[in-house]
Image: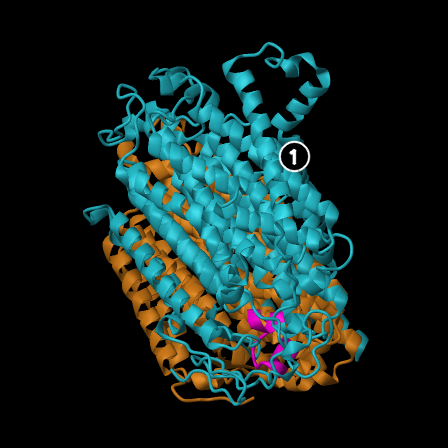
Amino acid sequence: MNMLQENNWLLSLGTFLPMVGVVLMMLMPKAQDQSVKLVALVTSIATLAVGIYTAFKFDFNQAEKMQFVANEKWISVIKSSYFIGVDGISLPLYLLSMVITLLVVIYSLDHVPSPGKPKAFFSLLLVLQTGMAGTFIAQDLILFFVFFELVLLPMFFMIGVWGGEQRQYASIKFFLYTMFGSALMLIAFLALFFKTGAESFSIPYLIENSGSIAKNIQIWIFAGMFVGFAVKVPMFPFHTWLPDAHTQAPTQGSVILAAILLKLGTYGFVRIALPILPIAAREWAPYIGGLAVIGIIYGALGCLAQTDMKRLIAFSSVAHMGFVMLGISTLTSFGINAAMFGMVAHGLITGMLFFVAGSVKERYHTLEISKLGGMLTQMPHLGWIFGFCTMASLGLPGLAGFWGEFPAILSAYSPATGLNETVFRVFMVIAALGTVLAAAYLLWLYQRIAFGTPKNAAHDDHSSHDELHDVTIYEWVAWTPLLIAILVLGIVPNLLFKVLDPAVQVTLSAFGG
Amino acid sequence: MKLFASESEVLAPLVSGWFLEHAWLIPVVPVIAFALIILFGKRLPMKGSELGVLSMLSSLVLAAGAGYQWIQRTNSATEEQFVEPVIKSWSWWRSGGFDFGIGQHIDGLSVLVLIVVAFISTLVQIYSLEYLRGDRRYTHFFAALTLFSGGMLAMVLADNMILFLLGWEVMGLCSFMLIGHWWEDDANSKAALKAFFTVRTGDAGLLVGITMLYFSANDWTQEHLGVSGFSIRGISAWALSGEPNSTVITISAVALFIACIGKSGQFPLHTWLPDAMAGPTPVSSLLHSSTMVVAGVYLVARLYPVFFVGLDILGSGGNLIMIIGAITIVISAALAFVQNDIKRVLAYSTVSQLGYMMLGLGAGAWLPAVFHIFTHAFFKACLFLGAGSISHSASHHSFDMKRDMGGLRKVMPITFITWVISTLALCGVFPFSGFFSKDEIIDNVGHNGYTNFMIIGLVGAFMTAAYMTRATYLTFFGEPRGASAGENSHDSHDSHDSHDAHATHDSHDSHDSPATHDSGGSHGPHESGLLITVPLMILSVLALSSGFLNATPFGESWERMKLWVEPRAVEVVGVTHSGGPGEALIITAPGAEESHSESVCGSATPESGICYAPQLKHAPFKWSKAILSMFIVFLGAALSWILSLLLFTKRDRRLVGLTQRVKVLGLGHKFLVNKYYLDVLYEKVIVRSIAYPIASAAYWFNQNILDGILHGLANSTKKLSGWVYRNIDQRVVDGTVNNSATFTKSVGTAAQPTQSGKVSQYGALLFSAAAVAALVLVIINT
C-alpha cells in the first residue's frame, strides 16, 4: 500500500489536542464554569482548525493513499505499533467528528443538561472526541481497539450521569452490549494476529497476509468482527441498546451517538472486515444484506409504534443504518460509496433531528408526541428546521439523505460477482418499500408535532409562555453548519464522492474489481 | 451557433439558438427566486410575491424563446429528418467509476410542457396576489409555489432520470407544503400527508424502475451513445434497439408506471387527489389539475419507447396503461356526480381526464395524449380559478354548490362566461380546444384497433358532459342559495363539508392581520377583481383557441403540433461524437434513402442505426365520427340539464329522494359517496394495520423477545460467570492477553463509582472469556 508520510504530526495533534483541553480543565477550580466553557470551546475550535488544515494539506488527487502516516513502536510485546494515517474513507469521518464535537460544545454552552457539572461534562465531550478521531485514523488493530473502547466510557458516563429517568438501565445496557461485541471483536483480532504468524497488528500487513488463512477460519473470524461491528452499527437484532441509550442520553449524547458513534461500526466493516477477510465477506454478504433490509423495515415499523419523539428518531437510525449496511453488503465500490455517503448524511441529519428533539424537550418538557402539536405556530423557525430535517431524513432528492439511500438501493441491483443477484434484487425492492415507510413515519411525526393547533396542556404547570422562545442564538450557531452541509451535500454530492471513491476502489481491490 | 455539424448532404443542418442552448436556466430562475423569497421575502414591499411573479415571468419568456427556436429548428429540418433534441450535460457526481450527469434534454415534448407550466404558473401567481391577500403565510405560499414550478420545470427538461426524480420529488414536497398551507386545520394536514404518502408509495416503483433501467441499459448506452444508463435519450434508444431482455423491460415499465399511477392520480391510487383540494384554490388549479399531476403522464410520454416495448403498446389486446386509464376515466367520472363540492367535481374530472391521457398513450395515440396535456392545462386551470373566484367573491369561501351557490350567472358574468367556455372545452365540443385533443384520443384508440376502449372513451365523454352540466347548473342557474343569496349563515357550516380553510372564518380572522378580504357577507355576491378575472379571461381564450394548433379536421397544414412536437420515428445512423461535459452532443443523422419506406422503429430491430421514437399511426379525421361523439356529448349534457332542472329547481317528486326509495339506486349512491370504499380500504385497513397492529407487534417483539433474550442471557451469564471466575486459571489468561486484562481493569475501576462494581466485574469476565475463546480458536486451528 502506498503511503505518504509528510506532515505526520498533524493527525496526532488533531487527535490528542482535546486532551490538552481536558488537562487544562482539570486544573481549574470547579466554580469557574465560564472559563471551563471557554477552554472547551477554544479547544474544540483549535481541534477543528487542525482538522481543516489537515484537509487542506490532504492530497485529494491521491485520496486512495494513506496520508500523514506515522508508524512508531508502541507495545512491542504484542507487536502492536502506533500506526496512523488517513485516506479518502477516513478523512470525511475524521472531520465530521471534529465538526460535530465543536457544534455540540457550542450548543452545550447554553444547555448543560441537569445535573450541571459543566467541568466533567465538557471533559467527557473532549475525551470522546479523542476516541472518535483516533478510531478513524488508527491503522493498527490494537490501536483501533483501544480508541474504539475509549469512546465507550465517556458515553457511558454521559448517559449514566446526565441522562433521563432510566439512565442507569440504559447506560449499563449500552455499556455491556457494546462490551460484548468488543469482546468478540477482540477474539477475532487476536485470531487474525495468530493466524497470520503473530507478526503484526497493522491493517495493511494483515490485508496482505490474510490470504493464507483457510476459508472456514476466515468465516469464523469474520463472525467475531461482524458481531462487534454490528452491535455498534447497530444492526438488527443487535440494536436494542440503541433506543434506550438514545432516549435516555442527554441531547448532546444522542447527537454524538447518532452522528459519530454508530459510524464506528460501519467504518469497521469497510476499513477492517472487508479488506482483510474478502473471502469470508463474500460468504457473509447475503446475510448482512438480509439483516440490513430486515433492519430497514423493522426499524420503520418500530418508529410507527413509538409515542416518544426521541425514541422514534432513535428507531429511525436502525432503518437508516440498514441502508448503509445494504450498500456495504453489495461489496461493490458503488455500494460502499453509497454507504459512506449515507454515514455522513445520517450523521448530519439524525444529529440535527436529535438537536431538535432536545430543544423540544427543553421547551415543552415532554417528548410525548400526543402532547405536542402546533409547533409551527409557536416556534416557526424551529418548525421549519424540523421540517427540513424530516424531509432530508426521508431521502428527498436535493438533500444529503438521498445520496446515501438511493445509490444503496441502486447498488443492490447489481452486487459484486459471486453474490446471488436474485437475492439482492429482492433486497432492493424491500429497501425501496422501506423508503415508503420512512416517509410514513417521518411525515406522520411531523404532522402531529408541527401542524395543528398548540396543545397547551403540555406545559400548563409552567404556563409562562416566554419559555416557548424560538431558536436561540446558540442553537442557530450550532445548527446552521449542519443545515448548510445537508443542503450543500444534497446539491453537490460529488464533494464527498470525489474523496471517497478512489479510497473505496482500493479497499475493494481484494474483490478483484 | 455551429452546434450541428452535418456530414450528410441530404440533411439540412439544424439551427439552434441561445434560448435552446440555455434552456437549463428555466428552472434555475425560480429555484433562486425561492431561496430569495425564503431569505428576504418578508422584508420586501410585496412580501416576496413580486419575486415569485417575476421569476415565473422570466421563465415564461425563456421558455417561449426556446419554443420559438425549437420551431425554427424543426423547420430547418427536412421532412423525414430526426430533429435532434438539444442536449447538454455536465458531470454531477462520480461513484464506483461511473459518471452521472446533470443537464437538459430539450425537444418538442419538453418545450411544450415547459411553456405550459411556466404560463399557468405565471397566471396562477398573479391570481394568488389577490386571492391570498392578507393570508398569514403569504410569503411562504409564494415561496412554495415558486419552488414547485422550479421542480416541475427541472423535471420536464431533465436529461437523465436522477434529475427527473429530483424534480419529481421536489414537486411532491411542495404539494405537501401547499395542501397543508392552512395546517391549523386537522383536515388539511391530513390531506397533505395523504397526498405525499400516496404519491410516495408509487415512487418506490420509480426507484426500482430507474435502477433496473440503469443496470440493463448502461452497457449499451455507454457503447453506442457514450452516455450513462440514466440518460433519457440513452434509455429511449436502448429500448428500441432490440437489445433489451423482454422480462426486464416489462418489469421496469410496470415499476415506472406504478409511480405514474401515484403521481397522476390513476386508479387505484387516485384517492389523494380529491382530498388535495384542501389546499388553497390556486394550488388546486396549478398543482392538482393542470401541471403536477400530469407528471406521471409526462413520464410515460418521455420514456415512451420503454413503455412501448415493455408493455407491448399497439399489440393486440389491451395493455396495463390502457386498462388503468380506461378504469380511471369511468370510475372517477361516476364519482363526480355525487359531489356537492365544486372543487371536488373538478378534481374527479381531472382524474378522469388524466385517464384519457393515459388511455391515449397506452393505445399508441402519443400525440393526441400530449396535446391533451396542453389543452387540458388551460381549461382546467380556468375552471379551478373560476371556482376560486366564486368562493372568493360570491359564496363566502364556501365551495358547496348545493348550499351556497346557484344563479350566479347574473352577478358574475365574466366568471360565468369563462366557465362555460372551459366547460365546453372540457366536454370536447367543436371548436373548443378539448375537441381537438380528446376526440383525437378516442378516435385514435379506435383506429389502432381497440374498439372496446374507444367505447369506454365515448362513455366517458358522455359522463363528462353530464357531470359538468350538473355542476354548471347548480352553480350558475336556478335560484341563489345560502351565501350566494346573501345569507351570512356560515356559522352553522360544518367546516368539513366546505373544506377550504377559508371556511373556518372565525379562526382565520382572529389570526389574521386586519382582514382585507373584500368579500364579507355584508357585500353580497359580486364579480371578482381584475387580478382574478384577467387570468380567467386569458385562460378562456386559450381554452377556446389552443386546439387550433393541431386541428386535424382542417388538414395536414393545421397539424402544427405533429410537426413540432412529435419525434420522427426514423433511424439515425452514425452516432458517437459524444461531446464532453458542457458540450452539446453532436450527432450526424441518416441518409434519407430509406426514409420513404416504412420506418422500422418500434417494430423491428434497427439494422444500422438508432431509433429514438417508435413509429406510430394517426387516424385520419372523419366528420362522421366527430359528429357521433358530438351527439353523445350533447345527449349527456341535455339529459343532465333536464334532470338537474327537475331535481334542483322544480323539485320533481318523482326524482327527489329517489335514492331513498329505490334500494338498488340507494346502494349505488352510497357506494359512490363512499368512493368505492377505497379510502376505507387504504386508511382503515392497510394503513391502520401497518401503523397499529403490525408496528405494535414489531415493537412488542423488540421489547419482549429481543430484550427478553438479552435479559435472560444477562442473568444466566451472571450465574455462569461465577463458575468461570472460580475455575479458570487466572495466570494463563493473564500471560496471554495481558493488555486486554489491564485495560479491562482500568475500565472497571473507572466505572466503579456509578455502577457499584458490577460493570467492572462483567467487563473483566467478558474480556477473560474473550481471551480464552481466542486461545481455544488458535489451538484448534493450528
Q: Is residue A250 above or below residue A425?
A: above
Q: Secondary structure at mark 1?
A: helix
Residue B286 point in image, percent of width and height: 43, 46
Chain A in the picture: what colour?
orange
The answer to which image quadrant residue A221 occupies is bottom right
Q: Amino acid at mark 1?
A: Leu
Q: Is residue B278 above or below residue A325?
A: above
> Which chain letter matches label 1?
B
Position of residue B773 in the picture relative to residue B207 (left or right): right
Residue B753 appears anywhere in the view? no
Instruction: Say if the magenta span includes residue B70.
Output: no
Position of residue A14 in the picture relative to residue B559 (left or right): left
Q: Residues within 10 Å of mark 1 (few under 14, many from 20)?
A: some
Q: What range is drawn magenta here?
A: B218-236
Q: Is residue A149 above or below residue B711?
A: below
The chain letter corresponding to cyan is: B
Residue A453 point in image, percent of width and height: 39, 30
Write down the residue under mark 1.
B678
Q: Nearer the viewer, residue B354 or B442?
A: B442
Q: How many marks?
A: 1
Instruction: Say if the magenta span includes residue B227.
Output: yes
Chief secondary structure of the magenta portion: helix
Q: Is residue B327 above or below residue B569?
A: above
Q: Residue at x 40, y 70 (%)?
A: B69
Q: Nearer the viewer, residue B408 or B175?
A: B408
